Amino acid sequence: MVAMASSNGHGVPLLLLIEGRSTDRPTTQEVLADAQGVLNIEWVGTLAEGIAKIKDHFVSAVLLDLSLPDCRDLSAVDELRKASPTVAILILARATDQALARRAVERGASDYVVTDQLDARSFLQLIAMMFERRAVEEQKFVERERAEVTLNSIGDAVMTTDTLGHVTYLNAEAETLTGWTRSEAFARPLAEVFDVMDALTGQVAQNPSELAIEHKKKVRLKGSYILVSREGAETAIEHSAAPIQDRQGNILGAVIVFRDVVVSRERSRKMLHLAEHDALTDLPNRLLLNDRLTRALAIARRYGRRVAILFLDCDRFKHINDTLGHAIGDQVLKSISRRIQSAVRDSDTVSRHGGDEFIILLSEVEHAEDAGTIAHKIIAAIAEPHLISGHELTLTASIGVAMYPEDGPDAQTLISRADTAMYHAKSSGRNQVGFYRSDMEAPAVKRLSLETELRNAIEAEEFVLHYQPTICLETGAITGAEALMRWKHPSRGLVPPDQFIPAAEASALIIPMGRWALGEACRQAKAWQDMGLPPIPIAVNVSALQFRTAGFLDDIQRFLRETPLASKYLELELTESALMVDTATSTKLLELLKDAGVILKVDDFGTGPSSLSYLQHCPVDVLKIDQSFVQEITPFPDGAPLLRAVIAMGKSLGCRIVAEGVETRDQLAYLRSELCDEGQGYHFSPAVDAEAFEKLLSMAPFAVPS
Ligand code: C2E
Ligand code: CA
Ligand code: CA
């Protein structure tokens, strides 16, 4: 039995049979008598009765006998349709009436059957098929509606064409931008509706539909284009086109997606702003603060500067909310945020941390006292009366201060310590500024300072090097390894460099630590070669301070000689800022290193104060493009313009290019397409200990997509 589709949602669908009595043949009613129970069939003898029934019952289908006297002129079809626009109408016709039956279908009936030799079984099958067809049609309709809603709610304009390039569809945005309505545009040649010219040459642009169909893949039109609307309005657009294919891969046409460049830039700018700002005060939120703070700390680290974090909490703010209500509370917060902003420089960041807490990042302070002065200025600004909805409110606030590098190495620690200091300030009488002191923490275990710990660690030889491979993007072969320092802390386990290198740099301990790393890397490189593994160069990170230390060159030459290791197997990674400190001296030193035969790499390329003209004169061999550029590549690469520019810049200097932080296949594929030479990142391998790296070295090359 064919499955019966139910369309009324109440189980078995109701069929209405409108059929006269007959003496010369079995009526359909008699034929279907056996099917009662499977089908729910009701019989009426006249059209009028049938129409009355449809009006107050949910009838799924009508079986209409064409031989009824009032059905011969087919107006019955119209009347049934009028009574129920959705009902299926199946015409029952004698063999001699087939022409008339076809006209009934043209007039709006769903289908017809010739009843002369019909048995119950085939009849049931026919009805089942009719229901199935209706269900499919309904489904299609729903899908079309859904697609329509989607296409109209996305910001992009969408058009489709058939294989000959005739317009078949425009969504609402495409209608707006082209000035054509869908029905007017229908079947016109694309170029007429989508009138695009090259912004530079003024020439008519290539037909995107033809391009997509010809190339059988998505094409993104590079360049600047102007769409001229039907009324002559001009819009700068970017567009792409892709072929539409059926399941078998036959091309059915093309879809063109385009957008107003200015509007979409503005839209993404707004989205970004919303994501990074507090809705009430429009101040930067935690996300943006974190970003700025991380950046400020990186700069401070490089140039040996200070950063101050101020943690501000309003005193008795809850009282205002409770007595005057939230609306007033909100106004107060806005007013406070304006006062804080007026007390600091534009280059400082004021952010709302939630509730009545604010965090202020002062990125250019020389002394802790300067931070204190600004904190007092903020308190004084807040203490001025606030006039809000007729209330004159006086407020106080407490501020805690934590300084980089004295009070902590990273954003998290600094914020929590400023918070601790604020808490102490508040509890020792409100309206105060307090500085963080290490004895504010619960003195459970008296902590050694990080610096003392590092000194001990050098003595106790607690540092190890891990190695991360760099990969040739063409062959997948390992081209070298970067040595990355780890601290095997007796109680904290393996500590990553971010947690101790800054302190080591601030205390100059990086000099002996870096010297150790150089010696260790040379030893390891040689040991691997002696084991018969393919010889590869090892890259060692060199801190700016270390680079400027007298004796740096001597140390290197001594390590190479004593190991002994051929100098081409030692690479040095220096950041742009390290090179830029004293360019004349750096250039000279780089040349000496170059003469000694070591390979020079610029680390984190693109993030520092790069001066192309300076780099042009530096004998550097390799540029390592910073991870942040690689992160620009998304799974749907709309291009990564910055990355492309940085690669091009590096190539123009004649350098080999290594991309750092390659994490995904998509990033890898994109880098290959941009002809980047090498890659390094978790997609291939994280930094691993020497033993694990040995295994990598003896394995087959990494897979690279073709
Ligand atoms: P760096 O020189 O930029 O090193 C690359 C960092 O990125 C390493 O972090 C590495 O583990 C990480 N990394 C590698 N692949 C990926 C990836 O696919 N995704 C992500 N998100 N990260 C990846 P690590 O080992 O924590 O080192 C951090 C920084 O510490 C280094 O940055 C370097 O500036 C410094 N450092 C490490 N060892 C030494 C050293 O011996 N001397 C000096 N002066 N600095 C060192
Ligand atoms: Ca590095
Ligand atoms: Ca790097």
Image (cartoon, helix red, strand yellow):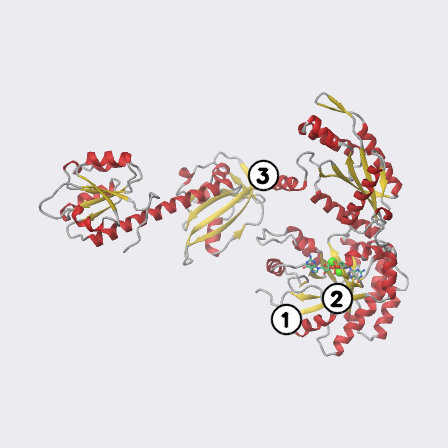
In front here: 254 or 36?
36
Question: What label sits on residue 466 in the rendered view?
Answer: 2
Determine the CA span between mark 1 and mark 3: 46 Å
Q: Which residue is mark 1?
A: 701
Return the disc, 1 or 3, that comes first in the chain's sequence.
3
Q: Identity of the amino acid at label 3?
A: Val
Name the disc covering residue 141, or none: none
Q: Earlier in the sequence, mark 2 or mark 3?
A: 3
- Frontmost of labels 1 and 2 is 2
Q: Where residue 680 sits in the image (x, y, percent)?
A: 68, 62
The answer to whether residue 95 is left or right of residue 447 is left
Question: Can the viewer see residue 112 in this picture?
Answer: yes
Image coords of residue 272 (percent x, y): 64, 42
Label 3 crowd (10 A; few <14 / some 14-19 / many >=20): some
Image side of residue 677 versus residue 28, left or right: right
For this orientation, the residue located farthest to the left is 24
Kind of residue indicated by mark 1: Pro
The mark nearer the N terminus, 1 or 2, is 2
Q: Quadrant of ligand 2?
A: bottom right
Q: Mark 3 — residue?
A: 263
